[in-house]
């Protein structure tokens, strides 16, 4: 079992969509319901020159889905089971090997655990269905991330619902 989860479980976050805007603004949108983390590591060596178009949008406010490795604007806090958490650690470690050139799964696993632990920390203490957003900026020290928490009671329907007018 991972050093970051106990049998009591913990909170993590799942991708959530309120409309189809993520499909328009991200190269690869995350799927609704997939587990997500910040994924800021992807931008660790970016400069202002990298921030254009859909890449800028992913950098500015995209969470990283852990199935599609696509981006999503909103995530919702929910409970995760130990076996799911362990599966995510393994999948993220594999992603680090395949995409980022980590030398081995053994070397990548602690980094994957740290990324998931960071997300679990962000979700800790929030009730189910709490929404989270991320906002990133480049600084001289690197990538800065800020988070916004929208409690379930604060998320009114008119904030997130799509309103349509029937065609006549």
Image (cartoon, rainbow, N blue to C red):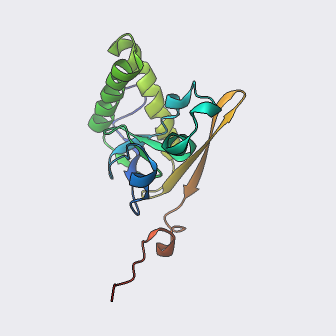
Regarding residue 59, the answer to whether it shows in the image is yes
Image: 99 above or below 76: above
Q: Nearer the viewer, residue 93 or 116?
A: 93
Which residue is located at x 48 percent, y 57 percent? 130
Q: Quadrant of the N terminus?
A: top left
- Image position, residue 84 (x, y; %): 29, 38
Furthest residue to the bottom?
Answer: 168
Which residue is located at x 45 percent, y 22 percent? 111
Asked whether, in this view, residue 86 is left or right of residue 51, the answer is: left
Q: Nearer the viewer, residue 50 or 89?
A: 50
Q: Quadrant of the C terminus?
A: bottom left
Furthest residue to the right?
Answer: 140
Image: 48 above or below 65: above
Which residue is located at x 35 percent, y 25 percent? 95
- Image position, residue 75 (x, y; %): 44, 51
Image: 9 above or below 111: below
Regarding residue 1, the answer to whether it shows in the image is no
Furthest residue to the top?
Answer: 103
- Image position, residue 86 (x, y; %): 31, 31
- Image position, residue 115 (x, y; %): 47, 30
Q: Quadrant of residue 35?
A: top left
Q: Quadrant of residue 60?
A: top right
Report the number of discs: 0
Image: 53 above or below 115: below
Q: Nearer the viewer, residue 42 or 46?
A: 46
Which residue is located at x 57 percent, y 24 percent? 45
């Amino acid at each position: 079992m991972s050093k970051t989860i106990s049998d009591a479980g913990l909170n993590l976050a799942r991708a959530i969509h309120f409309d189809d805007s993520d499909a328009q603004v991200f190269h690869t949108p995350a799927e609704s319901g997939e587990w997500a983390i910040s994924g800021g590591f992807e931008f660790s060596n970016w400069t202002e020159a990298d921030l254009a178009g859909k890449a800028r949008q992913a950098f500015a406010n995209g969470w990283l889905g852990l199935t599609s490795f696509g981006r999503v604007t909103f995530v919702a806090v929910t409970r995760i089971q130990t076996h799911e958490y362990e599966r995510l650690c393994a999948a993220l470690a594999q992603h680090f090997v395949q995409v980022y050139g980590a030398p081995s799964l053994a070397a990548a696993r602690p980094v994957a655990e740290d990324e998931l632990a960071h997300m679990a920390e962000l979700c800790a203490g929030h009730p189910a269905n709490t929404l989270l957003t991320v906002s990133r900026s480049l600084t001289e020290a690197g990538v800065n991330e800020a988070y916004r928490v929208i409690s379930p009671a604060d998320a009114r329907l008119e904030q997130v619902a799509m309103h349509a007018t029937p065609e006549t």
